[in-house]
Image (spheres, rainbow, N blue to C red):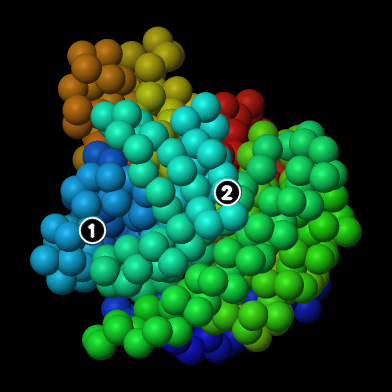
């Protein structure tokens, strides 16, 4: 993997770059749609490709449970199994284990948990997670980490940090073992909860491993927005400038703009497609709910400036009808629109950085975006 910074903003840490990966190069900053089960919900790969996405996220935990490593490896990896020709980043499953607290136990050697599908018992170790991602032929793989919720004790946060570091070391050792034909890279994950000294320590320990890239984990997990911004800015200061930085789990315009301002290059979130399936869509003035009666006879598109399939071919009235009738086309079109909106936002962000106008772009966008009440939340 090669990472080249092409533009830097003079008034912030925002930067443009190019990451060269096994399945092609991509421009950063970049938003990754989440395709948990090797499919972005309600969207055909062709639509993602035409929108401009060259990197999507899949999840190791879910793919390990179903359909399983052996079948995916038999097909030659996720790309061939799912017929996605561009890059794939696979999350390690650490967040899924975190969210399944009643069904898991964390030990030194790994995580013991019960499947949410059939209740069967499983173990994921740092080594096994890397082996799985190599079998998947992931372009970017993530280490197994310990994600923690807000408001835990300092002692618990420290224990999670130390275990995450030890798991990162073991993950690195496994990643460095040669697998013929595999060129994917491993990113480490910074933890430390909401204690600044622990964030600093975690960043320094992960950076010391000299991995190709670094992710910030444990943010956007239920904390207040101002706390998110504070810890994002603080943590990013300790990450190397010359390597790509990934902020896990953010997908609203406000959070994306904050991430870019702090020099983040990659981000992902399920929120854009999740809210779309419930009829909520992004517009330049904020989010709107297509299910509301005000749209019942509207001839207007979601956004007259948008060039996505939903906006060029359909009215708000028709889209509302689809949701009220329970037609699957409604979530499909709304999902395409939301991802198109975020991709277009990122494209405009990159252009503003090239021009040295990012902070002005951010201020102008948010002034307009917050002109109406927004129903979206980070996730």
* Residue 261 horizontal/vertical position (percent): 71, 63
Can you tell which mark lies on residue 69? 1
Q: Does the image show residue 286?
A: no
User: From what the image shows, is residue 307 above or below residue 378?
Assistant: below
The residue sitting at 44% across, 67% down in the picture is 127
Left or right: 248 as drawn, with respect to 142 = right
Badge 1 or badge 2: first in the primary sequence = 1
Spatial separation of the CA atoms under disc 1 and disc 2: 23 Å
Residue 325 figure quarter: top left
The image shows residue 368, relative to residue 180, as above or below, that is above
Picture layout, residue 162 above or below residue 365: below
The residue depicted at 57 percent of the width and 80 percent of the height is 211
- Disc 2 target residue: 107
> Which residue lies at the image location 48% right of the left edge and 62% below the top edge?
126
Residue 131: image location, x then y, percent = 35, 68
**Which SS class for mark 2?**
loop
Q: Is label 1 in a helix, a strand or a loop?
A: helix
Q: Position of residue 145 (x, y in %)?
A: 57, 56
């Amino acid at each position: 993997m090669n990472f080249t910074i092409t533009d830097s903003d003079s008034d912030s840490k925002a930067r443009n770059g190019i990451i060269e990966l096994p399945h092609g190069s991509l421009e950063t900053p970049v938003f990754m749609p989440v395709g948990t089960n090797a499919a972005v919900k309600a969207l055909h790969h062709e639509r993602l490709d035409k929108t401009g996405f060259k990197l999507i996220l899949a999840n190791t935990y879910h793919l390990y449970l179903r359909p399983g490593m052996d079948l995916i490896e038999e097909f030659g990896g996720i790309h061939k199994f799912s017929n996605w020709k561009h890059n794939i980043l696979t999350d390690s499953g650490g967040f899924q284990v975190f969210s399944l607290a009643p069904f898991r136990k964390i030990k030194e050697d790994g995580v013991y948990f019960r499947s949410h599908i059939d209740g069967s018992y499983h173990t994921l170790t740092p080594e096994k997670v890397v082996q799985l991602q190599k079998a998947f032929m992931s372009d970017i793989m993530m280490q197994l980490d310990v994600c923690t919720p807000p408001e835990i004790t300092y002692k618990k946060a420290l224990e999670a940090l130390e275990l995450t570091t030890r798991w990162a070391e073991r993950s690195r050792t496994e990643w460095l073992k040669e697998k013929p034909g595999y060129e994917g890279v491993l990113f480490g994950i910074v933890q430390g909860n909401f204690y600044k000294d622990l964030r600093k320590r975690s960043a320094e320990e992960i950076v010391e491993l000299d991995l190709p890239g670094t992710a910030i984990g444990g943010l956007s997990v239920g904390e207040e927005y101002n706390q998110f911004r504070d810890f994002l800015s603080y943590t990013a200061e300790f990450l190397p400038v010359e390597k790509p930085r990934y902020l896990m789990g953010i997908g609203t315009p406000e959070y994306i703009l904050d991430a870019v301002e702090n020099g983040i290059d990659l981000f992902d979130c399920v929120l854009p497609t999740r809210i779309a399936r419930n009829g909520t869509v992004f517009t330049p003035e904020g989010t709107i709910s297509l299910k509301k009666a005000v749209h019942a006879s509207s001839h207007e598109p979601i956004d007259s400036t948008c060039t996505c399939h939903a906006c060029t071919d359909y009215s708000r009235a028709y889209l509302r009808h689809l949701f009220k009738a329970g037609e699957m086309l409604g979530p499909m079109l709304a999902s395409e629109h939301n991802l198109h909106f975020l991709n277009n936002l990122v494209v405009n962000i990159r252009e503003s950085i090239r021009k040295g106008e990012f902070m002005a772009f951010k201020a102008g966008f948010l002034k307009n975006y917050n002109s109406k009440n927004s129903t979206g939340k980070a996730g």
